[in-house]
Image (spheres, rainbow, N blue to C red):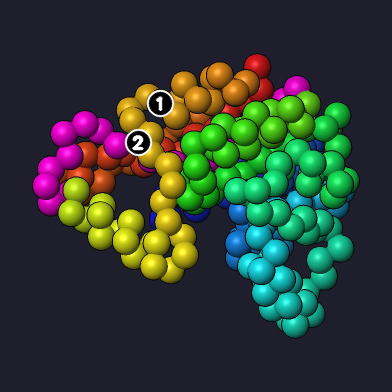
Amino acid sequence: MEVRTAFFDDEVLEAVTSGVTQVVIVGAGYDGRALRFRRPGVRFFEVDHPATQGDKRRRVEGLGVALDHVTFASIDLMRERIGDVLAAAGHDPARRSLFLCEGLLLYLTPPVVESLLRDLRDRSARGSRLAVSTREDMPGASALAAARGAGRRLLLALIGEPRRSSFGIGEFGQLLERTGWTIVREVTRHGRPGDRRRRLLLAAEVH
């Protein structure tokens, strides 16, 4: 988790110090980067399910923290298109953006993931960037790893966050390529011995 947090922090810091003025956090949850990396002239768009977003806003506003640099846009990613939601929220596709999808994509179905990546690409000016976390499963997972995976999936389903997507080795990179993105930075982390999967942190630019 520390590696993932540092990866996304680096992407945001690089963006806001290089002149990017729009940072879009998709599935923002309780992400605090809009507060930690606020800069004059930089607008953060937090896009999330209305229930989670409402709870977060109440908590932050209760602390007396100013949120004038943040635009909150509610969405159900399984039913709505993010392009429409961002347009209504005032996102400007003619200006460079950084899009963050951290800990999100495995909980969306493959068609929704592909539509999301295409929609973000369609709202990307030249020089925009996308940062994502995901994982790819290698063939031949051990019985122990398979059992662990089944247990995790059951737990996630019980708390209302079922895993809906899986990618084989190399598949996510191919998906990025066909939706208009070119990988420019990659961090690969492997799980426990016998786990037979790798966790990916990827930054991509439009092509």
> Whole-percent x and y of residue 168?
33, 30
Q: Is mark 1 on a helix, strand or loop?
A: helix
Q: Earlier in the sequence, mark 1 or mark 2?
A: 2
Residue 59 to residue 180: above or below:
below
In the rendered image, which residue does mark 2 sit on? 136
Q: Is residue 24 left or right of residue 161?
A: right
Give the residue drawn at x 19%, y 48%.
146
Q: In which quarter of the image is residue 86?
A: top right
Please state which of residues 96 and 73 is positioned toward the viewer in this rendering. Answer: 73
Choose top left, top right, bottom left or bottom right for residue 131. top right
Residue drawn 66% across the image and 54% down it: 76
Q: Indicate the amino acid at tag 1.
A: Glu
Compared across the picture, whether 80 is left or right of 132 comes to right
In depth, the one of 153 and 97 nearer the eye is 153
Front-most of 97 and 29?
A: 29
Q: How far apart are the alpha carbons under marks 1 and 2? A: 8 Å
Residue placed at 70% from the left, 54% from the top?
Answer: 75
Mark number, residue 171: 1
- The crowd level at tag 2 (other Cα within 10 Å; few <14, some 14-19, many 20+) is some
Q: Are marks 1 and 2 in contact (CB under 8 Å)?
A: yes
The spot of residue 38 in percent (x, y) is 76, 56
Residue 153, image x, y percentages: 33, 56
Quadrant of the rendering where the C terminus is positioned: top right
Q: Indicate the position of residue 58 as horizontal and vertical percent values.
A: 73, 77
- Placement of 162 over or under 132, stated as above or below: below
Compare residues 32 and 174 and report the one nearer the observer.
Answer: 174
Residue 92 colored in magenta in the image: no
Q: Give the range drawn in magenta.
A: 126-145
As helix, strand or loop, the secondary structure at mark 2 comes to strand
Farthest-out residue, left? 143
